[in-house]
Amino acid sequence: MTPDRARAARELLAFYLEAGVDAPLGETPVDRFAGPETRTDEPASAPAVRRPPPPHPAPASGAAPPAPEAAVMAARTAAKNAATLEDLRAILDGFEGCALKGTARQLVFADGNPQARVMFVGEAPGREEDLEGLPFVGRSGQLLDRMLAAIGLDRSNAYIANVIPWRPPGNRTPTPQETSICLPFTRRQIELADPDVLVCLGSPAAQALLEAKEGIMKTRGRWFNYHTGTRAIRAIATFHPAYLLRQPLQKRLAWRDFLAIKQALG
């Protein structure tokens, strides 16, 4: 292989990895664009393609996933049955109403200290989070750790989660239906953790939890009241660390938000 072709192959593999294509489906490549007369995957002598088992088994009944409206109602009922965060995690692990569970490797529930006074909520886990089973462990998580350290916090005195607990395929944006299905669990998670300050990282989290209508540039730095049903929690929106990695000049505004968080914690 020439150096140019080798470099092109490495770049293509890097593109696939970034897009979330990180597992082979078979040992033998198949040219899906070849015509019937040139296809090499049809003869009986061709090696059988061995596919890995799905990350999660289908329901024993074999029934199709419920309609979105039914899934949302099922999520609300299931979330209410959780008396503790451990209950909620177990319920989520057995919940079959969100199709993202079938494409993710594992549930990404939370990290940090559930008794902490401050809780951070992002949008959805990425590839590294899906592998580790913990939120914010990739590049954006490393930046979040540095931001926490700048105001005297770390994961021992902060609680971290996402609105969506399963990684969307290829790190795509979750659909509104997926968010609606997962939201009752996130709301119950906040209610059970009962922090004094809730921080929404990024516009999707702010829109889902604070019902913010404007973009993050206008929402960030503002204080809201988040109502759990038993009390109001002070809530603020700020930039998602992944956005700050793409737009480092906005770190100055995020710094103001984190100083406000520090002051609120007193």
Image: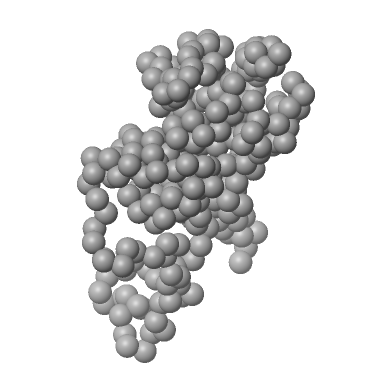
Q: Name the residue rendered at 41%, 23% in the picture.
A: 229
Residue 225 vertical position relative to residue 68 in the rendered view, above or below: above
Residue ID at (53%, 10%): 222
Residue 242, percent across and down? Answer: 58, 32
Residue 243 in view (yes/no): no
The residue lying toward the viewer, choosing from 108 and 61, is 61
**Image location (x, y in percent) of residue 142:** 69, 36
215 with respect to 177 (left or right): right
Residue 209 x %, y %: 43, 25
Residue shown at 67% from the left, 17% from the top: 265
Q: Nearer the viewer, residue 21 or 256?
A: 256
Closer-to-camera residue (36/245): 245
Residue 256 falls in image quadrant: top right
From where the camera sits, is residue 32 visible? yes
Type of colouring: one colour
**Measured from the top left, where is residue 120 in percent x and y?**
58, 29
